[in-house]
Amino acid sequence: MHTPMKTTILLAALTALILPINAEEPIKLAVGQPAPAFKIKDSAGKEIDLAELTAKGPVLVRLTCGCLGCNKELPYFQELHAAYKDKGLTSLAVFREPDTKVEAYVQEKKLNMLYAVDPQGNSWKVFQTKTMPSNFLIEKGGRIAAISTGCETSGLIAAKLSEKAAALVGTAAVDPRANVNARKPEAAK
């Protein structure tokens, strides 16, 4: 025979099985899902709309901070962008730094891709990540084709994303590491 206490405990246990755990926690983005609605202003104040960009072709969104590790990865991502921009890939770097610091960084590094500044980190919330850097390769039409997080300064992440980007734009893959390393002075290799 069930006592009121046992019935209450049983109901609580059944409710826990039925209701999602921590219902307020957002579902993490995953490959194959639609990219989130995302708009941000570039340094000139012009709105960048991810949906508009993905209507034209694939987009690589890189959430970054310009730290030492991100700085070491930048040449590989610039090479990836250069390899596929004429095939329709748009690369967007979103920096979590003050505008003035980013503008100096962009000039120094001769950044050759679309970029925006988000010192409040709202972009990280939209893309449901806390990791810097985080990369989201989104196919034409808006589905996520690849996600990579964390820093890897030898260019391996950029090389893997390059393979996926090549498949999206229908061309042979370029190894950004080989191209970047070929331009380095011998002592730095």
Image (cartoon, helix red, strand yellow):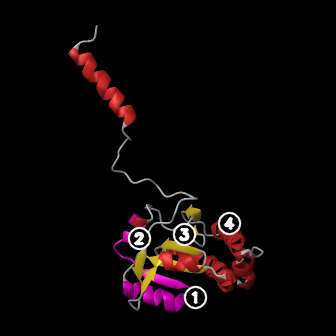
Q: Secondary structure at mark 3?
A: loop
Say which label, 1 or 3, has the lower sequence index: 1
Decide whether residue 53 is among the magenta residues. no
Say which label, 1 or 4, has the lower sequence index: 1
**Label disc, if present, on residue 160 of the rendered structure:** 4
Cα–Cα span, label 1 and label 3? 23 Å
* Crowding at mark 3 (Cα within 10 Å: few <14, some 14-19, many 20+): many
Amino acid carrying label 1: it is Asn
Amino acid carrying label 3: it is Gly
Say which label, 1 or 2, has the lower sequence index: 1
* Crowding at mark 2 (Cα within 10 Å: few <14, some 14-19, many 20+): many
Which of discs 4 and 3 lies nearer the camera? The answer is 3
What residue is pinned by disc 2?
A: 123
What residue is pinned by disc 1?
A: 112
Q: Residue at x 58, y 80 (%)?
A: 56
Which residues lie in the magenta part? 99-125
* Crowding at mark 1 (Cα within 10 Å: few <14, some 14-19, many 20+): some
